[in-house]
Structure formats: C-alpha cells, structure tokens
Amino acid sequence: MAIKDKEKKLFVSPPRNYAAELKFLLTTLLLLCTIATLFHFIPSSFTISASDLRLCISRISQTPPSPSPSPQSPPQASSIIHEKLTTNNTIKRFFNPYGSAAYNFITMSAYRGGLNTFAIIGLSSKPLHVYGNPSYECEWIPYTSTSSEKIITNGYKILPDWGYGHVYTVVVVNCTFNDTINGDNNGGKLMLYASTLGGGDRSFNVTDKMEVLVEHPKLLDHTLYDSKPKFEFLYCGSSLYGNLNPQRVREWIAYHVRLFGPKSHFVIHDAGGVHEEVLEVLKPWIELGYVTLQDIRDEERFDGYYHNQFMVVNDCLHRYKFMAKWMFFFDVDEYIYVPPKSTIKTVVDSLSQYSQFTIEQMAMSGKVCLQDDYGKTYRKWGFEKLVYRDAIRGIRRDRKYAVQPRNLYATGVHMSENLDGNTTHKTEGRIKYFHYHGTIAQRRETCKLLVNSTKITYEKTPYVLDTTMRDIAAVIKKFELKMIGSRLQNTRQ
C-alpha cells in the first residue's frame, strides 16, 4: 500500500507555470517572420557571407570589456614618464622614442674581389651617414678550423652616390683581410657587423649582425681572379622604370649588339619598366645569350635616389667584375658611336693604359624631324628620324664612361671616383654618344615639327642637321633581321 502511495506522489504534482517560456517562443517566431518579410524588400545584390559574419563576430569578441569601476583598487600608474620635478625645483622633461625611421643597413649583395677581399653592396640611412659616423666590421667564419682565433677586419665604407640619396644612401663596404680567405676551399661565411656608434640616439651603440655571403665547400675557383674574362664588353644598365616604349628598346638593343659584337653581354635591371611588350623585345636576345634580365622591383620599397641606380650599377660592377675586360655605363636613350674607320675594339685598345675613360655627349632633339619624312615618320626608327643636334656651345654636358672593372672599388652613374689607375676625358674624335633625351618613355609619335633646313631654333634652342645615325639605320635593320628574323617587325611604340 505504501508503494502505491509513492507512485501517486511521483505522477501527481502541482501544475507548473509555462507562461514565460511560451512568451519567449512566440516573440522569437514573430522576430523571425519579421526578418523574413523584410528580406523581400532588400535588393538581390545585397548578400551577407559567412566570412562577413565571422569578421563581425571576431571584432565583437576582440573588443575588450569595459573595466567595472572598483573603489577598492586605485588606477594603475603610467609606465611612461614625460616630466618630473627635481629637488632644485626644475622640471625635467623626458623623450620617449618609438619605432624606427630607417634601417641601419639593407643588403643587396656581396661578392669576392680577390683571394682576400670582398665587397658588400647595400643601402643605409642617409641621416646616419650625414650626421653620424657608423662603422663596419667584417668576420670570416670557416666551416672547419683548427684555430679559435677570429678572422676579423675593419670594413672600409664607400659612399658612391655623391650625396644624392634620399631616405637611404648607397654604401659599398670593402672587407680586405691580411691573408687568403677560404684557402683550403672548405667553405665558410662572411658576416658584417654594422654599428651606429650613437648615430640617431647617442645613448646607444646599436650593432646589427648579418650574414652576407656563403661559400660552400669545394666551389671556390681560385683561378678566376687571374683568368681571361669571358666577355670583351659588358653593359651595366641603370634601373628601368615607367611606361617604356618597346620600339625604342628594340632599336637600342639591336644597334648595340652589332656595335659591341659577339663577345658582349647586356645586363638589364627591371625596376618596373620591363612590361610585357618590352619583355617581348628582349626575349630574342635573351635566348641568344646576349641579355640578362634582373628583376629588382623590390628595391622600390626603399627611398633612394633615382630608383637606387647607384646601388644597382655597383652591384653590376662587382657581380661581373671578373667576367668582362671593359664595362660600359650609359642609358637606353643613349647610343655609343665610333667613326666608320674605327671599331669599338680599336678604340678601347687605344685607351688601354687607362682604367677609365669618359665619352662626350651629342644632345639630339626628340621633337624636330625632316620634312622629307612627312607621312612616313611612324615607319622610321627613332635615331633614323631624329636628326637635329643641339648646337649650344660652351656648356658642360653630362658624360658617360667605360672602365676596366678589375681596377675599381666602386662606381657612379657618370664616372667612378674609386679606382686604381688613371682616367682620361680626352676622347673627342674617337668615341661619342648620341642622347635622345625623353624618347624612351614617349609612347606616341616623337616628331612634332618637320623642317627642311640645316639649321633651326626650336623652343629657344639652336639645332643643326646631323644625319650620322640616320645614315647607318638600314645597316642596323638588316643586322637585326639576320640575327633574330622578322619576329619583332610588328613591334608598336
């Protein structure tokens, strides 16, 4: 009987109040119906993706909760001190640095310059070098060594950009050791220690340690530095940038491959200027082994002078130092010229006693053309139709140059000031260059004025007729056809 009473107690209980749960359920259903109704009035292009919802939720979850005021715990004191009152009633002010305005050193490359010497090419903070006195130290760490003595030497810094740098300036660090490095050919690595010596903050001497070069075992060729170079002539180009004219590049490379001959090579540096059409022009010459194209667009991150061209030409100098007898530095709107009875080989041979020679400029108009070309200028090559030379006398014009690279420590854009040996500027009558300024970046027809005269003044500049380059245009076109066929015949400006 007691068991039956217990069962009755389990199933018979006072009625429970479900009003609150029912109210919540009805409210939720009403809200969902309202949202569904509203969706009919929302444009179909409006969508909410799962990623949008996740982003919204993540932002909400990352929002720190507002701290509830607690009268028991006092506010925390700031760790930043801006000022304080000293014992002699003077207000002492403090300065709190954050971040970094420029890097101490940015490495581009490092190369051997011989059995005991290296060159490190890079960028560094310009204010650090202008107003400070940073120093460099080089260490060679062999992979195998029986001695615990460190192999260290002071680095000699060269600033080859003549103060033209912006946020960054170009630095070439020469590391010359007392003895042969890696003489056993067991390999090792070169370290650079760059110290600010208080530059930027006199309270600190910050030293950055970086690995700049690695030599693997048995790969060092000790004979390279005394051997005959592979190329007779090597062109080191400055940074190419902007919307370059592929037809002008086509004309330039064909002309100079013919001028320098089969033992020549051209190093082109792409800082954004080798777009798809320019690349198509270079491809035939790359395939023939005349051109090496290097993508240096990453250098645009660092604000240096003229797309860091001083760094680029110094990298080219040291990278190919032992691969060429003569190295030329000029731009792709400039054409080297030697008289008909000479060759580029006979010219450099006559100047072989010099480590460097400079080349005079013939400035050409990029707008004035011959009346005879009316209606057919678009079919003419640039140097074929631009035949008026600047006749202003008594002014200094920029010169370009050529060097025997094994005698250089660093170089510039218009000449080197860091070399062993002599320089000559007396090359008139032997070699010159025609400069078609601005035409390489002009994608439209260059001829703005057609004239039928041997002399003219245009935009306050006197010009004289000079058909030197025009006279050899047909020869260059025939040479290109022989070398690469007709694949570039439809190149557009």
Image (cartoon, helix red, strand yellow):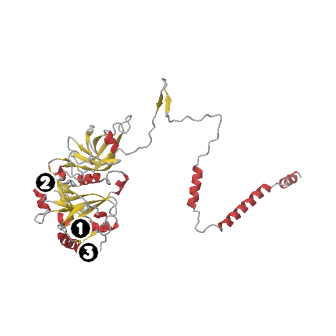
**CB atoms at circles 3 and 1 under 8 Å apart?**
no
> Measuring 65% from the left and 66% from the top, which residue is drawn there?
39
Q: Nearer the viewer, mark 1 or mark 2?
A: 1
- Look at label 3 and name its amino acid: Tyr
Q: Nearer the viewer, mark 2 or mark 3?
A: 3
- On the image, the x and y values in percent for residue 209 come to 34, 42
| Residue 217 in view | yes
Give me the C-alpha separation between circle 3 and circle 1.
Answer: 13 Å
Splitting the image into 4 quarters, where does residue 351 fall? bottom left
> Measuring 29% from the left and 68% from the top, which residue is drawn there?
448
Q: Nearer the viewer, mark 3 or mark 1?
A: 3
- Look at label 2 and name its amino acid: Lys
Q: Nearer the viewer, residue 307 or 61?
A: 307
Residue 374, disc: 3
Residue tagged by mark 1? 386
Q: Quadrant of the C terminus?
A: bottom left
Residue tagged by mark 2? 426
Q: Residues within 10 Å of mark 2 (few under 14, many from 20)?
A: few
- On the image, the x and y values in percent for residue 3 come to 86, 52
Q: Nearer the viewer, residue 24 or 106?
A: 106
- First-in-chain label (3 vs 1): 3
SS for callout 2: loop
> Is 144 above or below relative to 309?
above
> Is 12 above or below relative to 83?
below
In this view, the residue farthest toward the bottom is 375
Q: Nearer the viewer, residue 22 or 254?
A: 254
> Is 190 above or below relative to 397?
above
- First-in-chain label (1 vs 2): 1
Q: Going by the image, does 160 lie left or right of 242? A: left
Give me the C-alpha separation between circle 1 and circle 2.
Answer: 27 Å
